Image (cartoon, grey):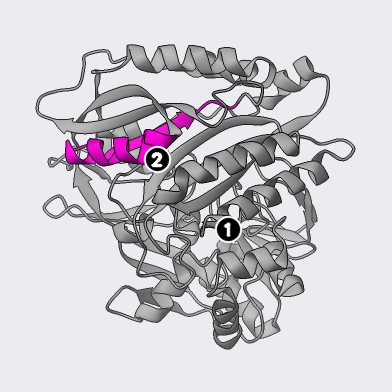
Amino acid sequence: MSVIEAFAPLQTSASVLNDVHSGLNRTRVAEVARPATIAAARSLIANRAQARQPLAMMGARHSMGGQQFLSDGMVVDTAALNRIETFDDQRGPVVVEAGIRWPALLDWLQRNPANRGHWTVRQKQTGGDDFSLGGSIAANVHGRGLGLAPLVDDIEWIEVIDAQGRRRQLSREQEAERFGLVVGGYGLFGLISRVCLRLIPDQTLEREVSLVRAADLMTKFDQAMARGCRYGDFQFAVDPESPDFLDMGILSCYRPVPGNPTERPLAMGSAGFRHLLHLAHVDKSRAFAEYADYYLSSNGQRYPLVAQHSGVYLDGYHVDIDHALGHCGSEMISELYVPRPEFARFMGLAAESLRQHRADPIYGTVRLIERDAVTALAWAREPWACIVFNLHIEHRGNGPLEAAAAFRGLIDCALDCGGSFYLTYHRWARPEQLEAAHPTLRAVLARKRELDPHGIFQSDWYRHLQRCL
């Protein structure tokens, strides 16, 4: 079989790609390759390496910083690399191809009669389910876990195809340095082809809900963890005209309890989320009030662990909102990190900055993260409070430029509090912000050039960093 025959299909004409969420990364690429097997992916990369031709990898296209696109180059779509290979019902690990999406894995675990131990994942990204595992590992995502480090802690080993087209199995014991470069390396150190993911037994979780002020939040999180809560987050008010802006929020924590879940636990469906998203654009205080009423009404309800992982993401939700607002727009995300004792001060600075920039926040949440001691480009360098902002951006006129200024303002607030920010949600950080927040960045990029001297694995995000630093 020839290399070309190994792809099903192989698209060789120019294509225009974009990210799913913000729609602000319209990128013309020379070709999109869709390998049907890991062997085909290895052959492709080996051939590109021999020809010294770069490529990028993409999974579900949710990333917004350009790390999955390569202008005028090749992009490898990993969607067909989605097989579940082995599952250990005694210990819990599952081995899968890294192009598989989280919903497919969770569904398989729930339906598989061999899963007698009722194993499930410990954490995944929240806010969206249809991400590839390889993309989540490359970004080293986190969920709403309490007392948990990022996803790297749930990975037993990975297989990666390197810049020479070789398949390597990596773990904390086997090529540990390269393991720490690939996980959280945003695709710069190889294509993640397979993963052995650690699982935990499913649990029944009781939801505990209260309204909390920012000044009290870290204490409330500590108290929840002392009661045994394993998951939790805080969703804050986003109306700049309200005195509750970035202060009042809904604290929801989840504690393992014996017994079965509530027979029909309260759950908001797609229609409810669509309604709240519309309100968040036109009447933010009402949106928060309705959301708070909903969550408070679910206090004490019991849910399976898998339900805590899954959420509602409405594909194309902004079309109806665009009609209502009279312009084309979307939301852009950024995540800021601050030492927990600095959280309340950060929220005050952020509120002032967002008002000054006349930003349009749609949604925001706070989670906790523990230190990541494994990855080379660790965003979780210490136990942070993690603050996520979704800002509405008008695509016309100066909308993107104004949003960029607002996000740079938030980064300054985090840095002022001794914090950091997530590298790849956008490419709007100033060079000095990049270096202040990510002190290992230059060293990691230098190591990338050593391991990939011909620059086989690239992306628009990587090229941006090369111009900046």
Q: Nearer the viewer, residue 433 or 40?
A: 433
Secondary structure beneath label 2:
helix
Q: Which residue is mark 2?
A: 104
The residue positioned 44% from the left and 34% from the top of the image is: 214
Where the C terminus falls, by quadrant? bottom right
Q: Earlier in the sequence, mark 1 or mark 2?
A: 2
The stretch drawn in magenta includes residue 343: no
Q: Nearer the viewer, residue 29 or 138?
A: 138
Quadrant of the drawing holding the N terminus: bottom right
Residue at 68% from the left image edge and 41% from the top image edge:
353
Whole-percent x and y of residue 448?
A: 57, 80
Rendered image quadrant of residue 143: top left
From the viewer's side, name the closer residue of 241 and 399. Answer: 241
Q: Magenta stretch?
A: 215-238
Residue 463: name its quadrant. bottom right
Residue that badge 1 annotates: 415
Residue 207, placed above or below residue 283: below
Q: x and y percent of residue 148 in the render?
A: 30, 51
Q: Is residue 125 above or below residue 94?
A: above
Q: Amino acid at mark 1?
A: Leu
- Which amino acid type is shown beneath numbered disc 2? Ala
Left or right, 358 with respect to 422, comes to: right
C-alpha gap between disc 1 and disc 2 = 39 Å
Say which element carries label 1: helix
Q: Is residue 174 left or right of residue 186?
A: left
Residue at image position (54%, 78%) is 444
**Residue at left 23%, top 37%?**
223
Q: Counting other residues with Cα less than 10 Å from the Cα at mark 2, is it few (<14), some (14-19), or many (20 or more)?
A: some
One can see residue 318 in this view:
yes
Task: Find residue 150 and report its image quarter.
Answer: bottom left
